[in-house]
Amino acid sequence: DAGITQSPRHKVTETGTPVTLRCHQTENHRYMYWYRQDPGHGLRLIHYSYGVKDTDKGEVSDGYSVSRSKTEDFLLTLESATSSQTSVYFCAIGLTDTQYFGPGTRLTVL
Amino acid sequence: DQQVKQNSPSLSVQEGRISILNCDYTNSMFDYFLWYKKYPAEGPTFLISISSIKDKNEDGRFTVFLNKSAKHLSLHIVPSQPGDSAVYFCAASANTGFQKLVFGTGTRLLVSP
């Protein structure tokens, strides 16, 4: 299994508060991704990174920002959480011809 | 606009029988296709893939078929086992230099003993 961890695994927060999710990899891979999974939508790409300090937007990037200061860490920040951001968030890294996913973070915004 | 579609939200089969999961895509630039399996409270795990230069790829009990003219792919599981019960996601990518995947909405497979 690819060495990908996510923290926290579960979080409940209130509308308007900032939230940061962390993805940590031990594979030294260049490409990292953040997805959200919602019923009826599958997995949708939020942001991705193709190297340290190199990031770009995905399909559903509004309300999210990311940072990557080290190869192994990719942070996803919700500057002011909204109820529509209640979801399960997955980090992934790209290896050869596929991507490997972390265990996910379940975020609930009340 | 959903570029990758899985029109069956769920599928139930009996143990030992064949499971067929379907996926359609609209973007003719897609040239690489993957299937992922997801158990509850876990991340998706890669199952099998196929390049557009092939029309079939087999790995044990799992076979993926690609029909480029119909923009359709299917995953066959033979024989199905109760441990195959999971959500299956189809994904596709265009060769843009790195793997930017577009996922379908998933099909929940239930294999009953």
Image: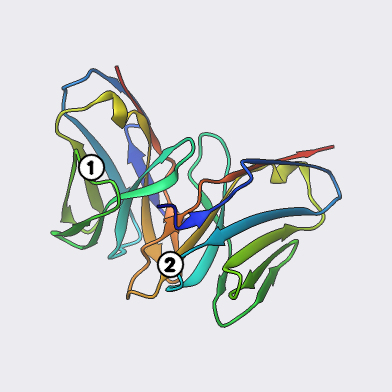
Q: Which mark is residue A76?
A: 1
What residue is drawn where x is 49% and y is 38%?
A40
User: What colouring does the structure picture have?
Assistant: rainbow
Labels 1 and 2 touching (C-beta < 8 A): no
Res. B98 image quadrant: bottom left
Q: Mark 1 — on which chain does it sit?
A: A
Q: How many other residues sit within 10 Å of disc 1, few (<14), some (14-19) or many (≥20)?
A: many
Q: Amino acid at mark 1?
A: Leu
Q: Secondary structure at mark 2?
A: strand
What residue is drawn where x is 34% and y is 41%?
A6
User: Alpha-carbon distance for marks 1 and 2?
Assistant: 23 Å
Q: Residue furthest bottom?
A: B53
Q: Which mark is residue B93?
A: 2
x and y percentages locating residue B93 in the rendered image: 43, 67
Q: Secondary structure at mark 1?
A: strand
B60 left or right of B107 in image: right
Q: Mark 2 — on which chain does it sit?
A: B
A94 left or right of A53 in image: right
Q: Which mark is residue B24?
A: none
x and y percentages locating residue B30 in the rendered image: 45, 71
What residue is drawn where x is 17% and y is 53%?
A68
| Location of residue A11 with respect to A58 vertically, above or below | above
Foreground residue among A7 and B3: B3
x and y percentages locating residue B60 in the rendered image: 74, 65
Res. B69 image quadrant: bottom right
Q: Amino acid at mark 2?
A: Ser
A23 left or right of B48 in image: left
x and y percentages locating residue A76 in the rendered image: 23, 42
What residue is drawn where x is 56% and y is 35%?
B40
Q: Establish whether labels 1 and 2 are both on one chain.
A: no
**Which of label 1 and label 2 is nearer to you?**
2
Q: How many other residues sit within 10 Å of disc 2, few (<14), some (14-19) or many (≥20)?
A: many
